[in-house]
């Protein structure tokens, strides 16, 4: 069995001694060396100050009465040059009052009277060395903490940049997925995409009027964009039938909110928007489908959508009638407040300037016309996808 590794030796603390009396300097040096310290002895305060950078002492002991510069002045200068050292002043009894002022001013750690008692002197120096060691340790920990904080700040900045890039990637992929879903429905019903774009913008504008901001605003815009995505699961002869639907066909059509909701459940970041997809045919008075929900049991996003969907339906061309003016839509929505629509949301809708709705419609119409032109070109599919992706959700 191998012997345990001995602990590392305790480093020898260095003590600077300054006195103009050579006999006292030698005596102090022998006492300190015998107590396990490494003395550095000087007869001149100036020479001691010059040697501080090289000595780097734990303790400085200085006589009070010295020629050219007294001990208090010397220790003050030593403190400015090397503040980590603990300072001790040796003084005769008649100088004690002056020396005590130096202690109170913070220039001196302790006083040692002349003549000194050897045991008391060694004890004071050891206490001073301990104080110096603690001061150095505190400074080391402070440097390490500062360095750690700097590194942590740099790491946080790097992590923030990574998270921002990840957020951009997720956003790009989300938009690409939304575009893919809408494009898939567009293959079935050419009008659906631009209707979906309009109501998405409309829903965002009405939500802003209500004070909705941030992520909830995006959820409402996404839900409005995808509201009819469940129609992908409706058969062509039902979805595209020009005349009235039979009761059986109507039941199939009424399943599209649930089909759309189920489709959105497969994508985590579409789940919040799926409530709008599921509830977009519910009415304030409970006469809608699929669940017959009423009042505020219907989610806010779905209640917003129901109003802007009516706005778009009334102001857009239909096979059975031409588009109606905004004033007609406004009056119809006002009339149906409390039945089809949430009355509080209708009030907010009526406060939105008509030019805001007109601007949204014109922007989407411009995009639709451009898309039609691009689709006829040699790179039509690619350019059309680029245009759709450029449109904010």
Image (cartoon, rainbow, N blue to C red):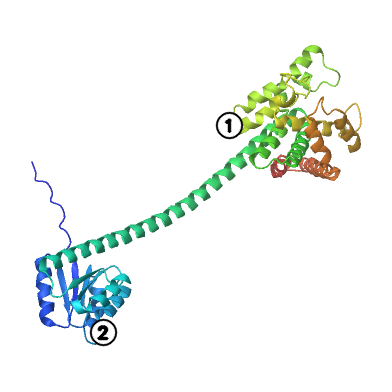
User: Residue 209, how many percent across, how many down?
Assistant: 76, 41
Q: Is residue 10 left or right of residue 275?
A: left
Earlier in the chain: of badge 2 and badge 1, it is 2
Would residue 266 be visible to someone looking at this image? yes
Q: Which residue is mark 1?
A: 268
Quadrant the C terminus occupies: top right
Classify residue 222 by image quadrant: top right
User: Residue 227, how many percent across, how many down?
Assistant: 72, 29
Classify residue 261 by image quadrant: top right
Closer to the eye: label 2 or 1:
2
Classify residue 22 by image quadrant: bottom left
User: Residue 86, how many percent across, how many down?
Assistant: 25, 68
Along the line of sight, the residue nearer the viewer: 204 or 228: 204
Instruction: Please tell me which residue is depicted at 42% across the width and 55% down the height of the picture.
Output: 149
Q: Which residue is mark 2?
A: 69
Is 155 drawn above or below residue 198 in the view shown?
below
User: Residue 48, how many percent across, how many down?
Assistant: 22, 79
Q: Residues within 10 Å of mark 1 (few under 14, many from 20)?
A: few
Question: Mark 2 to mark 1: distance in Å?
Answer: 79 Å
User: Could you say whether the residue bearing mark 1 is in a helix, strand or loop?
Assistant: helix
Is 141 drawn above or below residue 183 in the view shown?
below
User: Could you say whether the residue bearing mark 2 is in a helix, strand or loop?
Assistant: loop
Instruction: Please tell me which residue is depicted at 9% across the width and 44% down the height of the picture.
Output: 2
Along the line of sight, the residue nearer the viewer: 16 or 214: 16
Q: Are marks 2 and 1 in contact (CB under 8 Å)?
A: no
Q: Residues within 10 Å of mark 2 (few under 14, many from 20)?
A: few
Would residue 191 be visible to someone looking at this image? no
């Amino acid at each position: 069995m191998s012997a345990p590794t001995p602990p590392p030796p305790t480093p020898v603390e260095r003590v600077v001694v300054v006195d103009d009396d050579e006999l006292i300097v030698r005596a102090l040096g022998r006492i300190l060396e015998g107590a396990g310290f490494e003395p550095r002895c000087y007869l001149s305060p100036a020479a001691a100050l010059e040697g501080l950078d090289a000595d780097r002492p734990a303790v400085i002991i200085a006589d009070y009465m010295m020629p050219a510069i007294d001990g208090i002045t010397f220790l003050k200068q030593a403190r400015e040059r090397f503040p980590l050292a603990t300072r001790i002043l040796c003084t005769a009894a008649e100088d004690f009052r002056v020396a005590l002022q130096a202690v109170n001013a913070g220039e001196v750690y302790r006083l040692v009277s002349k003549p000194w008692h050897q045991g008391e002197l060694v004890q004071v120096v050891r206490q001073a060395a301990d104080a110096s060691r603690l001061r150095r340790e505190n400074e080391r920990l402070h440097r390490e903490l500062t360095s750690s904080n700097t590194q942590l700040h740099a790491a946080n900045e790097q992590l923030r940049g990574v998270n921002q890039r990840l957020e951009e990637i997720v956003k790009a992929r989300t938009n690409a997925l939304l575009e893919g879903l809408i494009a898939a429905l567009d293959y079935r019903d050419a009008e659906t995409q631009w209707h979906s774009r309009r109501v998405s913008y409309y829903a965002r504008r009405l939500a802003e009027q209500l004070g909705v901001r941030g992520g909830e605003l995006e959820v409402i815009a996404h839900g409005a964009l995808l509201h009819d995505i469940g129609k992908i699961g409706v058969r062509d002869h039902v979805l595209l039938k020009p005349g009235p639907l039979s009761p059986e066909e109507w039941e199939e059509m009424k399943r599209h909110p649930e089909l759309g909701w189920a489709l959105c459940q497969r994508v985590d970041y579409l789940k919040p928007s799926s409530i709008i997809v599921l509830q977009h045919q519910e009415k304030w008075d409970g006469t809608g489908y699929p669940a017959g929900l009423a009042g505020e049991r219907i989610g806010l996003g779905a209640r917003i959508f129901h109003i802007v969907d009516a706005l778009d339906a009334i102001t857009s061309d239909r096979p059975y009638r031409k588009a109606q003016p905004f004033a007609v839509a406004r009056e119809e929505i006002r009339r149906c407040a409390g039945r089809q629509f949430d009355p509080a949301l209708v009030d907010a809708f009526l406060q939105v300037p008509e030019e805001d709705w007109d601007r949204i419609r014109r922007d989407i119409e411009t995009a639709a016309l451009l898309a039609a032109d691009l689709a006829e070109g040699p790179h039509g599919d690619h350019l059309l996808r680029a245009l759709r992706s450029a449109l904010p959700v």
